[in-house]
Amino acid sequence: MLKPIKTDRQHAEYLERAYELMQMEVRPNSAESDELEVLSILIEAYEKTRFPIEPPNPIDAILFRLDQLGLPKSELSRLLGSRSRASEILKGKRKLSIGMIRKLNENLGISAQTLIQEYEVVNG
């Protein structure tokens, strides 16, 4: 009987069983597919609490997404309206405005949740 995961050992056992099930040709709506689904839910819930992942810094997320899309940093200037504004954002001298967040979300597909994260602004 499956129970909520409370230890690393139990987590390892559930991962092993999930792997075994994934190697089988499990039929949809079978007992095995139901077991795999429940295991996946339990494993995910445990991992979210045991190994939380902090959202990325908004600037790092922008740079990563530009790189992912194969776009130059100058694309940020086009999106935000000026090279100096983009430069200030990338150097951490200026915070993202709501309008900038909307444009980055719509044009680059970066989640607003990531872009609204607090980050330190460098003075000078």
Image (tube, rainbow, N blue to C red):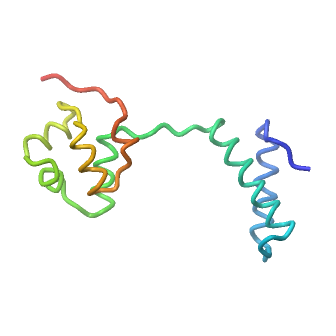
Residue found farthest to the right: 1
Q: Residue at x 79, y 56 (%)?
A: 16
In the shown orientation, is residue 38 left or right of residue 93? right
Q: Where does the image place residue 81, in percent across and percent down from the top left?
A: 10, 48
Q: Quadrant of the C terminus?
A: top left
Compared to residue 12, the image places residue 57 above or below, namely: above
Q: Where does the image place residue 54, in percent across and percent down from the top left?
A: 48, 37
The mark total stands at: 0
In front of the other: 112 or 21? 112
Q: Residue at x 32, y 43 (%)?
A: 60
In the shown orientation, is residue 82 left or right of residue 99? left
Compared to residue 123, the image places residue 100 above or below, namely: below
In front of the other: 116 or 87? 116
When asked about the image quadrant of residue 3, the answer is: top right
In front of the other: 44 or 19? 44
Compared to residue 122, the image places residue 82 above or below, namely: below
Q: Residue at x 35, y 29 (%)?
A: 118
When asked about the image quadrant of residue 22, the answer is: bottom right
Q: Where does the image place residue 76, in percent across and percent down from the top left?
A: 18, 51
In the shown orientation, is residue 89 left or right of residue 21? left
Q: Where does the image place residue 10, in percent across and percent down from the top left?
A: 82, 43
When asked about the image quadrant of residue 91, the answer is: top left
